[in-house]
Amino acid sequence: MQQASRRRFLQTLGASAALPRLASRLQASPSDEDYWQMVRRQFAFSEDKVPMNAANLCPSPRAVWEAVSRYTRDIDSDCSFQNRAKFRTLLEEARSKVAGLLKASPDEVALVRNTSEANSTIHNGLQLKPGDEVLVWDQNHPTNNVAWEVRAERFGLSVQRVATPSRPSGKDELISVFEKAFRPRTRVLAVTHVSNVTGQRLPMAELCQAAHRRGIYVHVDGAQTWGALDLDLHQMGCDSFAASAHKWFMGPKEAGLLFVRRENIARIWPGVISVGWGNDAQADPKGARKFESLGQRDDAALAALGVAADLHRMIGPDRIQSRIEQLAQALRDGLSDSGIEWVTPEEPSLRAGVQIMKVDAEKRRPLFNRLYQNHGIAAAPTGGLRLCPHIYNTLEHIQRAVAGIKSRMA
């Protein structure tokens, strides 16, 4: 009876959701701009308020926010245990879909609230001793460097910040900087895959190999790459990986992931113990699920995470990455004759979707405001002027951003 009820519920969703109607069109070959115009139309923003700051917050496509609304309405119309039982299945389906996109096992993926919570689980859950050293990148987000320093103050750890060249010659130079910083007491390397303040991208597979040769645990903050790059976490080689759905993944708000490689799950303690853990200290929910024993969750957001994953799968992570790279290059090409100096490296392998240009601090916010007020482009005054185009952006949006920047640089 319960299974039949769930089937009817999902059929109702399918009949009214935008996602099934999009499936065949999203899987078509994106051979021209018409395909991406169709993708753009799945987002609710108006042409006079165009988002171009995916590093901070992305709009969700219609299929995702409609799913959140329907799931929420379903719960509010009947919040009984009987009705809500189906969300356990929907959660596991979402987990499986997210894991599949990352080429990981569902048992290695915890669905948490955001990157900050996922990072915190690793900061506080790894067993370290006084005097142990944690190596961090000085371009990390505060949740992956300041947070380590807070733990160091409490427990006598040592935190060393590593600075990389602003204009690296290539991957080898970046790897060398970290290798030179490894010391006998280094136990953890905690880095951000792509910096939100420079756009610099670290060669993670090579860094993971270098660290593992010395027995160093590697944690990666992937807030700027989940949803932007076609990721294979096992090929990358990291021990754990954190990210938020509200950025490049274009998913529901207050949802994220923590990937922990299977062999590392037992060595990390969860930060919160609630319903779902069990009735004693030895209870251990299967796999990475132990990191999401967080009490009452937003079941609608977690279920809609599966819809976001469906959209990525239908378009194709490789296509999404290629489109982001195309838009980023079009932005750079459009400004090539303007005298703009870029903070973000020119070399494509050392950057991703985050593009930051140098702007004096006193001019930064006025330019950021005028770009939005006069040209309808929402950027960010982070590290300079930051523009992060995504698949909901068009080449016309890029041209408008270029024109707005040039008009203020003249």
Image (tube, rainbow, N blue to C red):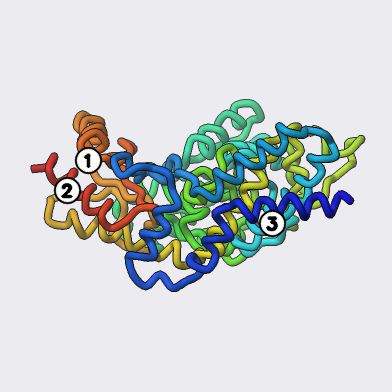
- On screen, residue 210 versus residue 330, left or right, reads right
Q: Which residue is mark 2?
A: 403
Q: Quadrant of residue 152?
A: top right
**Above or below 154: residue 108:** below
Structural distance between the alpha carbons of marks 2 and 1: 9 Å
Q: Quadrant of residue 272?
A: top right
CB under 8 Å between discs 2 and 1: yes
Q: Mark number for residue 167? A: none
Q: Earlier in the sequence, mark 2 or mark 1?
A: 1
Q: Nearer the viewer, residue 169 or 131?
A: 169
Circle 2: element type: helix
> Residue at (57%, 64%) from the top-left corner?
232
Q: Quadrant of residue 128?
A: top right
Circle 3: element type: loop
Q: Which residue is mark 3?
A: 261
**Number of residues whose C-alpha sits closer than 10 Å to that of mark 2, classed few (under 14), some (14–19) or many (20 or more):** some
> Residue at (45%, 40%) from the top-left corner?
57
Q: Earlier in the sequence, mark 2 or mark 3?
A: 3
Q: Which residue is mark 1?
A: 375
Q: Nearer the viewer, residue 120 or 175?
A: 120
- On screen, residue 352 versus residue 120, left or right, reads left
> Could you tell me residue 254's position as x and y percent?
58, 37
Circle 1: element type: helix
Which amino acid does the dot numbered 3 rest on? Arg
